[in-house]
Image (cartoon, helix red, strand yellow):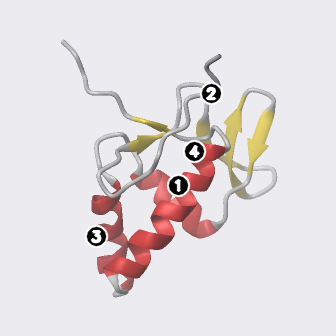
Amino acid sequence: MAGPRNISVSEASRPVLPRHARLKYDETRQVWVILAPERVLAPDEIAVEVLQLCNGERNVGDVADRLAAKYAAPREAILADVIAMLQDLADKGFLTEAREKTS
């Protein structure tokens, strides 16, 4: 019996929100939220920044590179934190792996 397909996030992963989920700014609450069927998640400021970089084209290594440059922080520490955060979201069903485009 196949359960939900959870991804294993690595530096080479190209994470993206699944089709049923959207990152949206909630004007009423003045907070970013991930909207999914019957679920809402309010990620913290850092998670929002990471998620905005997860467009299905960049891999996790690219995201870590951008954040390390922006915050002048050690890339390896950022990479470890980003992978842990994205894996947590993937385990909860809020993240999937981008598919190669077949044309």
Q: Earlier in the sequence, mark 2 or mark 1?
A: 2
Above/below status of 50 relative to 91: below
Tell me the mark number nearer the camera, choosing from 3 and 1: 1
Secondary structure state at the residue bearing disc 1: helix
As drawn, the label of residue 4 is 2
Q: Badges 3 and 2: C-beta atoms under 8 Å apart?
A: no
Extreme residue in the left direction: 103
Disc 4: CA contacts within 10 A as few (<14), some (14-19) or many (>=20): many
Distance from the alpha carbon under mark 2 to that under mark 1: 16 Å
Q: Is residue 64 above or below residue 7?
A: below
Task: Using the numbered discs, state the Cα–Cα distance from disc 1 to disc 4 in whole angstroms.
Answer: 6 Å
Q: CA distance from mark 4 to mark 2?
A: 10 Å
Mark 3–mark 1 distance (CA, rounded to whole Å): 15 Å
Quadrant in which the N terminus appears: top right
The mark nearer the N terminus, 3 or 2, is 2
Closest to the observer, 2 or 103 = 2
Q: Are marks 1 and 4 in contact (CB under 8 Å)?
A: yes
Report whether 65 appears left or right of 9: left
Q: What amino acid is at disc 1?
A: Leu
Q: Which residue is mark 4?
A: 90
For the residues labelled 4 and 3, the Cα–Cα distance comes to 21 Å
Q: Are marks 4 and 3 in contact (CB under 8 Å)?
A: no
**Amino acid at pointer 4:** Ala
Other-residue count near label 3 (Cα within 10 Å), few / some / many at <14 / 14–19 / ≥20: some
Residue 86: give its label: 1
Residue at 68% in and 43% down: 92
Distance (Cα) linking label 3 and label 2:
30 Å
